Amino acid sequence: MKKFEELKFNIGELKGISVKNIEEHLKLYAGYVKNTNLILEKIPEYESYAKEDTFAPYVVSEIQRRFSFEFNGMRNHEYYFKSLESGAKSLSANSQLKTAIEKFAPSFDAWLAGFKTLAMTRGIGWAVLGYDKKTEQLVHIWIDEQHLGQLNGVEWVLGIDMWEHAFIYDYPTSEKKKYVEAFFANLNWEVIEKNFKAAQ
């Protein structure tokens, strides 16, 4: 199977999110890529032990279960870092995404307030704006950890990492709301618009 490659991101200086936090966060992303590839290497190895070791199939099952955590950790972070590339850019007034958001919520500002509330969900995970092709509508998703709560067939448009590692060098956990505000202050909405068009 083809190996997954660690992507490089063009993230400049951000407002309210330090270089240190981004550097450490990128190391974590690199670990997800590494572990995703290691699991793919290990599965055939353990499968070859199946005739000799009755526990080998259970080991394979648990490693396979772990694969979804590592894989989603890799992909979630790719969406996240991509959305912070090339500096903050606003969402144009006539964008397709803005139109879709205004059908999904009473107004863009009302949607944004609701999404920020979702991001403040207690616990570790991700707040995600997704697009369901079957019903042609936007949906909000809270994903526990990296992988629990993903909705089948729903494509990511926007995601914010709400694990403590995303902001701990800049804000204590009691001030994570400041991190949410900083994320949106640095968001490249042109990337998010492209995600939306690709999701359709």
Image (cartoon, rainbow, N blue to C red):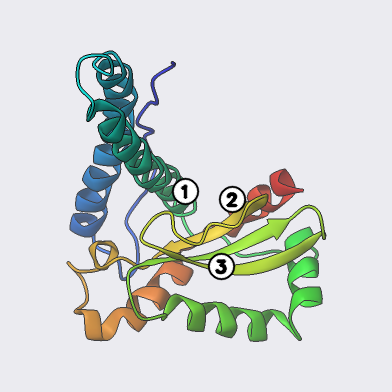
- Mark 3 or mark 1, earlier in chain: 1
How packed mark 1 is, by other alpha carbons closer than 10 Å (few <14, some 14-19, many 20 or more), is some
CA gap between label 3 and label 2 equals 19 Å
Secondary structure category for the residue under label 3: strand
Residue appearing at x 19%, y 79% in the figure: 172
How packed mark 2 is, by other alpha carbons closer than 10 Å (few <14, some 14-19, many 20 or more), is many
Q: Is residue 81 left or right of residue 93?
A: left
Please state which of the two labelled residues, at mark 3 or mark 2, is closer to the viewer.
3
Question: Residue beneath label 3, please?
Answer: 141
CA gap between label 3 and label 1 equals 26 Å
- Can you give x and y, in whole percent of width and height, for residue 32 in the image? 30, 40
- Mark 2 or mark 1, earlier in chain: 1
Question: Residue beneath label 2, please?
Answer: 191
- Can you give x and y, in whole percent of width and height, for residue 78 in the image? 44, 44
- Can you give x and y, in whole percent of width and height, for residue 93 in the image? 76, 69
Residue appearing at x 24%, y 26% in the figure: 56
Kind of residue sitting beneath label 3: Ile
- Can you give x and y, in whole percent of width and height, for residue 19 in the image? 23, 56
Q: Quadrant of the N terminus?
A: top left
